[in-house]
Image: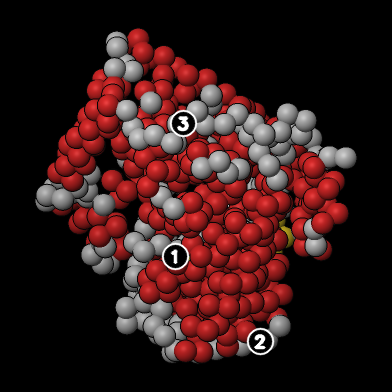
Amino acid sequence: MSEKVERLKKEGLFQRFLNFVEVAGNKLPHPVAMFFGFFIVTIILSALLSQMNISVTYQAMANGVLTDKTTAIENLLTLNGIRGIFVTAVSNFTGHAALGSIVVAMLGVGLAEGSGLMNATIKKIVLSTPKSMISAIVVFAGVMSNVASDAGYVVLVPLGAIIFLSFGRHPLAGIAAAFAGVSGGFSANLLLGTTDPMLGGITTSAAQIILPGYSVDPTANYFFMAASTFLIMIIGAIITDKIVEPRLGTYDGPKMELDLNSSLTEQEKKGMRYAGISLAVFVVIILLMIIPENAALKLNASEIQNFIAKNGRQPGVMEVLKPFISDSIVFILMLMFLVPGLAYGLGSKSIKSHKDVIKCLNDSMSACGPVLVIIFVSAQFVYVFTKSNMGIVIAVKLAGVLKGLGIGGVVAAVGLIFLTAFVNLFVGGASSKWLMLSPVFIPMFVELGLTPEYTQLAYRIGDSTTNIISPLMTYFPIIVAFAAKYAKKDEDMGVGTIIAMMLPYSIIFLIGWTAMFIAWTYLGLPIGPGVSMFI
């Protein structure tokens, strides 16, 4: 009798439900074939639903003016629809958010791994970190990585597997812990990120519909989101240790070839010194590119003036640093692995010539092959789903249901959390959903006596919690590809495995975060500097 059947007999109702989700999900075809199927079904549905004249009308901001906008299901089986599918196929792939990030970042990671720096660093981490703390550290690192845009998906998620494997733990649990922090805890952070000013700007426009001159600062939700970092870290670690990893069973794949009973060798120590010095020099160079006035990686004087003219206010720190944080962070992360990796190789003698460097880079690109295949197919599906307007129709219909219930106060805010969590399964992107929902809910909540900042906070909680179980999330198929490396030989790694693995995080994050939101409301605590919940 297999190990999985034995576990099934001993598990409770919730674990059996997760097993059902996994088994049912994995009966679907390979993720590549599944996304191709979604692609075909979406095109057919767009033709059928458009013939039924399904559409929605909602208020939207256009050039700072609130207007009524009608969106209908678009038929993709027309001449224009078919042409669009063909002429955008390449740009859908090359423009996919994950493509450039993965390929560029993996060059640096590949050299760091090939030179031996990754193994030496992990060995040092393992020898100095209590085993009981590793889950919390990985989840926390995932949450904090959000300040660096999407880099956490590319670097930290696969690194989480390696870290867990080096501790003798299941690598899929490491992927789950990192993914839960990076994506499930997307809105939490101890630092302000690029999402804060972006959402604040959208909320400002929606608030001015009913409150002329009202402005929402990027720091509007900072107190709550900073506290949420520790909530996500604690809950995420408990779920990893008590639910996810026990359910995965014993890992019988390749183990880390690390001698954890001895300290670093002299060559490894020399390589680590070289890597440390090179990293320190690299950090100093980057600081010189972001700190001085008119530095290369911050907005210059003319760009700041253009920002003021467009937005009517001074840019915040995160907006001034946009060239660093948003535009070049992936390249910087690549160099942050590549430079110390090269220095380590020279110091430890694991790299003897430029041919060794090129081999490491080539090996890292070879490993990207399965990921690139999934990206290509999933990018075509995302295009047709977005082009069909199905996501918008679903979002607006559900928003109308919640508004029509006539509920108020914190109950309405909790309703928005759950609505957003559900809509997030169909409409990706924090800004795109908020552009649709904010003109509906912010005026509605202001009339109920709730501030725009409080409404935005409710939205952000819902927007984070279901990222990790939505196949439509940009990086979801990439996580499937990362996890496939650690699948058992007699089992396929499918969407069902990932959803079943991440579902406990999604459900408990949603419940725990909502409970914290309710408690924060009744305690009357400020959600940001000088920001209250009630008008």
Q: Quadrant of the N terminus?
A: top right
Residue sitting at the far right: 1
* Res 54 quadrant in image: bottom right
Q: Evaluate whether residue 4 shows in this view.
A: yes
Point 73% across, 29% down: residue: 489
From the image, tell me which residue sits under label 2.
407
Q: Residue at x 52, y 20 (%)?
A: 366
Q: Residue at x 27, y 26 (%)?
A: 266
The quadrant of the rendering that contains the C terminus is bottom left
* CA neighbours of label 2 inside 10 A, class few (<14), some (14 to 19), many (20+): few
State the image coordinates of residue 229 (x, y, percent, origin top left). Answer: 44, 65
Residue 229's disc is 1
Mark 2 or 3, nearer chain start: 3
Q: Residue at x 35, y 35 (%)?
A: 263
Q: Find numbered disc 3 in the image and state the secondary structure of the residue it sits on.
A: loop
Between residue 416 and residue 488, name the one nearer to us. Answer: 488
Q: Of circles 2 and 1, which is in front?
A: 1
User: Please, what is the three-letter code of the amino acid marked with disc 1?
Assistant: Thr
Where residue 382 sits: x, y (%)? Answer: 63, 42
